[in-house]
Image (cartoon, rainbow, N blue to C red):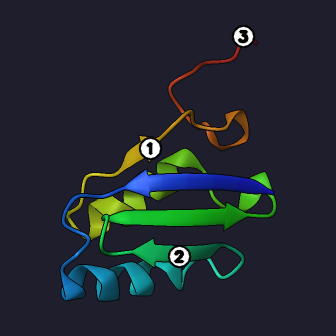
Amino acid sequence: MIEVEIYAPGLRAESAVMHLRNQMDHFPKVRYKVDTRHDLVYFEIDKPGDLNQMEINQIFDAIDLQPRFVGQIPEELRSGGTTKLI
């Protein structure tokens, strides 16, 4: 299991939480908790293919929030940004 913590300033707004819930409906295998007091979202991901870094960014971009990963991003979630030699 992979655990990721995201800081998203502005998440305290009730409309932002509702939009986040709507976005997370697209990822039924991913568990999450919202801490609105601190603008944090905790993700629990069983398999690396269920959600990746780019998808997390897209979730928050869709609700006009800037996600910031707390701590180191697990290698299994890293996507894009690197190229592979053929």
Quarter residue 27 falls in: bottom right
In space, the residues marked 2 and 1 are separated at their CA atoms by: 15 Å
Q: Nearer the viewer, mark 3 or mark 1?
A: 1
Measured as percent of width and height from the top left, residue 9 is found at 22, 58
**Residue that mark 2 sits on:** 33
Q: Pointer 2: residues within 10 angstroms few (<14), some, or many (20+)?
A: few
**Residue that mark 3 sits on:** 85
Q: Pointer 1: residues within 10 angstroms few (<14), some, or many (20+)?
A: some
Quarter residue 86 falls in: top right
The first of marks 2 and 1 along the sequence is 2
Q: Secondary structure at mark 3?
A: loop
| Mark 2 touches mark 1? (CB < 8 Å) | no
**26 w.r.t. 45: above or below:** below
The first of marks 2 and 3 along the sequence is 2
Residue appearing at x 18%, y 80% in the figure: 13
**84 w.r.t. 61: above or below:** above
Residue appearing at x 44%, y 44% in the figure: 69
